[in-house]
Amino acid sequence: MPGVDYGREALDFIEGLNGYSKVPAAMDALERAFCRFGFETIIVTGLPNPDQNFSEMVLAKRWPAEWFKLYTENNFDRVDPVVRHCRRSIHPFEWAEAPYDPERERGAAEVMRRAIDFGMQRGFIVPIHGLTGYEAAVSLGGVDLDLNVRSKPALHLMAMYSFDRIRRLLHPTLDPTPRLTRREREVVAWASQGKSAWEIGEILHITQRTAEQHLANAASKLGAVNRTHTVAIAIRNKIINP
Amino acid sequence: MIHIISFANRHLYEDVLEEHFRLRHNIFVEERRWEALRKPDGREIDSFDNEDTIYLLALEGRRVVGGHRLYPTTKPSMMSEIFPHLAEVRGCPSDPLIWEWSRYFIIRDRRDGNLNLQLMAAVQEFCLAEGIAKISAIMETWWLPRFQDAGFKVAPLGLPGLVEGAWTMAALIDVSHDTLRSISERTGLPSVIQRKGPHLNAVARANLHRKRNDIIREIA
């Protein structure tokens, strides 16, 4: 892509990621962004330990269904040289840079060969190493790629932030629960007992308007659409005890 | 505990600071091979170690086991002087409320434990207490998921580039109660920093170095 401002494009993409609240919509955005570099397949995945299955580790993917079936049924992750190199590398690399011996490692040669049948001729993978030894990756594949010294740093950063966004969407508990003030908690607790804003005001010696304001603040902090929803979220997150 | 050491109280910590300069040489030069930092006397000291630097050092007794430092971005910083190309897209910050975070280290036999999280908590706790809003950093890109794991909100300022063979990025990190809380939940410690002796007001100090033009622009 001549004349592309890779830096600006990547950073705008990264900032935009926060706007997606559902995995499919975020994956659509990833697909659109990586497609501009010629990538046709995307996988966002943890790397399995010996006692884990690859298919359970996948967070999100845009892979040909047939290839995923073939890959998982044959446990290709156990022999895939890209996966092996990914565990040892802290830097992103092209699939072709993953070393293996085609003579002695038949399984490795087979994965690399069969991937081509599914339009995954070339690829770029970004390893993720978490705090507690968690290993993961974002791997992108395609045929006609814009993969060069200028585009790689952009893809590197885009992939890392994509991983973080997808993981947070799948495990929202990673995001700290919003904190309500003592007053907001009290007001929500009384609302959960069926009290109206006027009654809560009387109980807490505040005006009805103030009680309503506390309820509205609590609702917006918790992302609730109305009072019932606020109470439901507060109970679910153990912010109040029913 | 992580001790806060500045120009104001360094007389209480001269031995500790000295040991920390030697540790930095061991770790950044001997171990990580940043040859540009090599010094004949075995003390890794650069132009960002001066009366405006604030050191956050993890001590066990008088023994230094890890640490990092903060430096005002209202002065020429590592990012603006050495790595401006890494912040090409969004630009290098220069703001009394933004401090540059660097030289993060942990001695070899403490790397597996809780100390890493405590050092991360320390920068958040200290900055919250001082009213510092954000921290800028030049960091190895592979650390990004580790910071994100700990609850740090890290925004890139440009694309990564190779520095001494490692992909490295410029970033701006939010200082927030949410981040501190999520780390504290993991460390089990509500507070990790300790202050002794007179203490320096970081933001006021940073303000002293603001460029005249920036101040005039703000007033006008």
Image: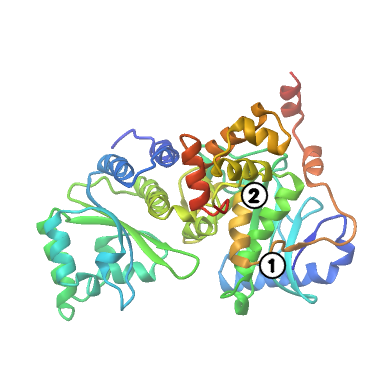
Q: How many residues crowd mark 2 within 10 Å: few (<14), some (14–19), many (20+)?
A: few
| The quadrant where residue A35 appears | top left
Residue A31, horizontal then vertical, whole percent: 27, 43
Q: Earlier in the sequence, mark 2 or mark 1?
A: 1
Amino acid type, mark 1: Lys
Chain identity of mark 2: B
Numbered label attached to residue B39: 1
Residue B197, horizontal then vertical, whole percent: 90, 60
Res. A43 visible in picture:
no
Q: Secondary structure at mark 1?
A: loop
For marks 2 and 1, give the CA distance. Answer: 39 Å
Q: Is residue A204 left or right of residue B200?
A: left
Q: Are marks 2 and 1 on the same chain?
A: yes
Q: Quadrant of the C terminus of chain B?
A: top right
Camera-side residue of A44 and B47? A44
Residue A4, horizontal then vertical, whole percent: 34, 35
Q: Secondary structure at mark 2?
A: helix
Classify B57 as above or below A2.
below
> Which residue is painted at 71% across and 70% down in the image?
B40
Q: Is residue A99 left or right of residue B151?
A: left
Q: How many residues crowd mark 1 within 10 Å: few (<14), some (14–19), many (20+)?
A: few
Amino acid type, mark 2: His
Which residue position is annotated with label 2? B177
In this view, the residue farthest toward the left is: A117
Numbered label attached to residue A133: none
Chain identity of mark 1: B
> Which residue is painted at 24% across and 62% down in the image?
A96
> Which residue is painted at 70% across and 53% down in the image?
B70
> Which residue is painted at 56% across and 37% down in the image?
B91
Residue B173, horizontal then vertical, whole percent: 58, 48
